[in-house]
Image: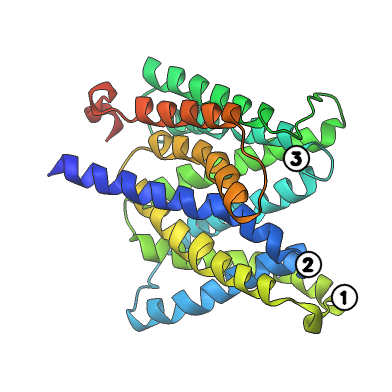
Amino acid sequence: MKHNNQFSTYLILTGAMLFWGLSFVATKIALQSIPTFTLIFLRFSIAACLLLPWLIHRDRLSFTRKDHFKLFLVALFEPGLYFIFETIGLQHTSAPKAALIIATIPVVVLFAASLLLGERISPAKLFGTLISIGGISVLVAGDPQFEWDLGGPLLGDLLIFGAVISASLYIVCARDLGKNYSTIEITGMQVVYGALFYAPAFIWELPEIQWAAISTNSIGALVYLTLFATIAAFLCYNHALTQIPAFRAAIFINGIPLVTAAGAWVLLGEKLTLIQAGGGLLVLCAVYLTNRPELQTVPQEF
């Protein structure tokens, strides 16, 4: 029974990975006619409008002040600070280098979960993380348009690393909240606080929005980002965090670039090389290695 439960958890995590991976393709389409922070606000505010009535109807909003603070922190880290750091950081550093920095999220989660949640650090986890980062490196370097440039402004790199810290703290905080609250309660409040966080940026962009110029493709992409990359993906990922240790869920994040590359190849006609496919295979091997049951020490992690 436990094996079946873990299989369903990994299946759900794979769903979140697919939803988030394709979100980069959808975002690229949506941004053709919707400003950046308006897009983020719309996807989270619409998601909040869909989830909040259900929570009110089911009387699932009885949080303590302390837990409201924790829920606010979850939303502050993800989507709040994460998207700000990533969006601004990409304006000051190259996308390939940003991808490599983002790939260190499992490393930060590994040590943060050990420090804050008491999860055990094992050699298999460290080895799997290194393989995963290596796979991301191959995936990035295999891009036909890739240019190896480790120089550039330090500010951009620091901002992207800020996104790494934000995502890692979200994973750890959500894992802790999952001990007392359901997935939909956590996700519902996460999108509500996320929408409130981005409301000022939306108001700032509001006068310059050309509503009549928003294309049908952008609207379709917004619908995908709201229903799948926001509601479905966060429900899947937050549920997984209630079932398995933070690190084992975090390692799946490094599969997102593989999904993005494959999605861009199929939907946008971008090139996908054999080298990139090899890098993606390394990432999948790392996910498998770090989640093999015989390599887990259950008493210490649960």
Q: Which mark is residue 228?
A: none
**Residue named by callout 3:** 159
> Does residue 49 sit above or below 10 in this rendering?
below
- Quick one: SS at disc 1? helix
Which residue occupies 82% across, 76% down?
Answer: 209
Label 1 crowd (10 A; few <14 / some 14-19 / many >=20): few
Which residue occupies 35% across, 37% down?
Answer: 245
Which residue occupies 68% across, 77% down?
Answer: 216
Question: From the image, which quarter does the C terminus lie in?
Answer: top left
Q: Are marks 2 and 1 in contact (CB under 8 Å)?
A: yes
Q: CA distance from mark 2 to mark 1?
A: 9 Å
Q: Is residue 109 rendered to the left or right of residue 146?
A: left
Name the residue type under label 1: Glu
Name the residue type under label 3: Leu
Residue nearest the observer in this picture, 105 or 117: 105
Q: Are marks 3 and 1 in contact (CB under 8 Å)?
A: no
Q: CA distance from mark 3 to mark 1?
A: 26 Å
- Quick one: SS at disc 2? loop
What percent of the width, then of the height, locates residue 135?
A: 54, 26
**Residue named by callout 2:** 35
**Residue named by callout 1:** 208
Q: Is residue 15 rendered to the left or right of residue 140?
A: left
- Quick one: SS at disc 3? helix
Which residue occupies 41% across, 38% down?
Answer: 246
What percent of the width, then of the height, locates residue 268?
A: 66, 54
- Reading the chain from its start, which is encountered first: label 3 or label 2? 2
- Reading the chain from its start, which is encountered first: label 3 or label 1? 3
